[in-house]
Amino acid sequence: MDRGTTEGALLIELGGRLIEYRFARRRRRMLAITVDAAGLRVSAPLRAPWREIEAFLRDKERWILRKLDAWSRVPRAPVLHGVSGETLPLFGTPATLEVRPTAHYAAVLGVPAPRVTLSNARTQWGVCTEGGAIRLSWRLVHVEPRLADYVVAHEVAHLVEMNHSRRFWGLLAWLHPDWREARERLELAAATLPVLKGTR
């Protein structure tokens, strides 16, 4: 690729090693390098000559290699799928995840317990798909259990009524009589949950 204009992955030899790095040009005044779990990233001013970029990397060679070696020894973060048997740290102690179907509310409506998965959604507590599966935001662990129960009841009601018709609200009232209060409290709780700045 044209190294002068295109963003992407490049290679450079440092300390006798071939190092891959992500390169991007930005509206900035100075060159910058970052080394973390994702590897080496380089940001350069829009018009920085390529010889200056490579000279900068070679000048920082020892620091880059030291950082890359340090990160290579850090265990990779596990990818969780939200299924029973997975292990995750809870206050520094390994805990085994046990996912249980929303069998209670489904049984009340006389429908099979749906497949339940976890999502990383920030603005949607739960969703019921056309295929009859339910996804729940893992962030429900931040709220009172009975508020999480309301979300489950809401999505289970959608197994019968995929809308917000009068019949849907009747089903929800049958499953969770105080749904109005729970919904209001959930909205208030959502506004008070911690927000992590600078996360991706």
Image: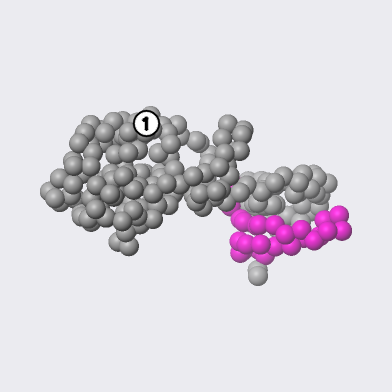
Q: Give the range drawn in magenta.
A: 3-28
Q: Tell me the quadrant of the picture where the N terminus can be found.
A: bottom right
Snapshot quadrant of residue 133:
bottom left
Query: Which amino acid lies under the numbered mark 1 shown in the image of this protein?
Result: Glu
Q: In this view, does 72 lie to the left or right of 160?
A: right
In the image, what residue occupies the spot 37% across and 33% down?
145
The correct choice, above or below, for 146 with respect to 126 in the image is above
In the image, what residue occupies the spot 18% across and 41% down?
173
The correct choice, above or below, for 173 with respect to 130 in the image is above
Give the residue number, with chain letter if any, for mark 1.
144
Mark 1 crowdedness (10 Å alpha carbons): few <14, some 14-19, many ≥20: few
Q: In this view, does 65 lie to the left or right of 164?
A: right
* 154 in magenta: no
Looking at the image, which is closer to me, 133 or 59?
A: 133
Snapshot quadrant of residue 67:
top right
Looking at the image, which is closer to me, 54 or 21?
A: 21
Residue ranking furthest to the right: 16
